[in-house]
Image (cartoon, rainbow, N blue to C red):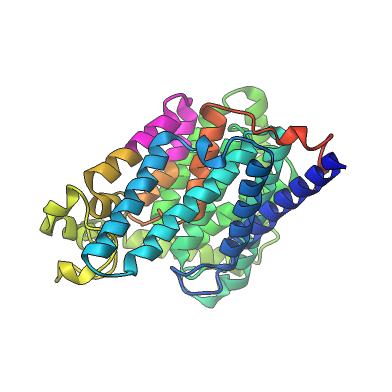
Amino acid sequence: MLREKGAAVIFIILWTLVFAGALSPVYLYPSGQPQPTDYVFVILVCLIYFHSIATAREFPLARIPLCWLLLTCWVVIHCLVSSLVLQSSEFYRVMAFWIYNTAVASCFLYIAECGEKYSLYIERAICMGLIISGLGVVVSIGEGGRTTGFFNNPNQLAFFSLLGVSSLLVINRMCLPLKPLTVAAVFSGIAGIFAAASLAAIAGFCLVVVGYLLANLQAVRLFKFLIMVVLLLMGTVLFDHQVLTDIFENVHSRSLVAGGKFDSIGEERNYDRIVAFPEYTIVGAGEGHLERFYPYNKNEIHSSFGNLLFAYGIPGMTLFVILLFSLLRNSPLPVWFVVSGPIVYSLTHMGLRTTLFWIFLSLVWSQYGKKKSCGLESWVPGKIGPM
């Protein structure tokens, strides 16, 4: 009876995971506010943390690298102190993002380290998210300008697509299976990257492709890659000719302004705020009350690294770099290229609040870092069942 109840709990957890993944590309509210998938992820976090306590398993947070936990703690302490000094509740929202993303990532790590049959549900969740995102691309491609899909802006679509494809590569240890769900997801992810016409995402995707090719130099795997390419090319036939034309024109028009955007990157991405107020890079200025930085107070710094350095100082940047090194130090060279894709994107865009980014990092840690069993397998007799 106990085992049956345990199996039912795991069944609910795994399919809640898939449902949350499917909702990930659907934005119904303004950016910066919780989206429908966030509420489902909160339920997932509660279920998994309850499971770990009820079964006396290792707490999910214990599976997160120490430098990651220290980074989150530093941000939380920084936000609390900033809110006290500046007498503002504006920093609480930022603090909530970091705590939430760390908690969600710990749950993915908790499931991923339990074995292949549980990681399969993570793959399904990511595939469903990419496919839903691809449907959003098809629906919105004819509206003119850069495509947003079901997101609020094209950069969100591009980053989500790039992270989704990268996550599938990592969770499959750099060898994508020729399964219909996976092929459809990869195709949707590539369509999202190019339909959004994000130059940073396209550059990052090129690094991901290099990583994939380096990992698949064997003849058999190259043959599978060629089959994948053929399937993707055949899939383009299903698209309306005008859809492909619109994607090409978006990418072409963006490439024409690439030189100008590079020349004005300091002002456009608000890097000049760091130059104007270098003293804040020591311990950080926090993410809020931008009026302090007039006349450099327009929006946040559009760079994960720039924002991290200015908002949380040398300690925050150092902990994040150590985290990346911890994830990659035991990884083969192809994985370095795959991780470099989202990192290159983050140089000119602020992606630290994107939940899938932290999920991606947790998958890299689970596949190429230290592994531990969480004991879910002792609760579920046999396989959960195919999708």
On the rendered structure, is 262 left or right of 162?
Answer: left
In the image, what residue occupies the spot 60% across and 39% down? 110
Q: In this rendered view, identify the residue nearer to me: 247 or 63.
A: 63
In the image, what residue occupies the spot 43% across and 68% down? 32
In the image, what residue occupies the spot 28% across and 64% down? 83
On the rendered structure, is 117 left or right of 263?
Answer: right
- Image quadrant holding the N terminus, namely top right
Reply above or below: 347 against 362.
below
* Residue 300 x/y as whole percent: 29, 64
* Residue 13 x/y as whole percent: 71, 50
Residue 370 highlighted magenta (yes or no)? no
Q: In this rendered view, identify the residue nearer to me: 166 or 387.
A: 387
The rendered magenta stretch, by its main secondary structure, is classed as: helix
Reply above or below: 280 against 208.
below
Q: In this rendered view, identify the residue nearer to me: 139 or 36.
A: 36
Residue farthest along the right direction in this orientation: 1
Q: Which residues are magenta?
A: 321-339
On the rendered structure, is 228 left or right of 274?
Answer: right
> Could one spot residue 315 in this view of the protein?
yes
Residue farthest along the bottom direction in this orientation: 143
Reply above or below: 15 against 221.
below
* Residue 35 x/y as whole percent: 54, 67
On the rendered structure, is 278 left or right of 150?
Answer: left
* Residue 23 x/y as whole percent: 63, 62
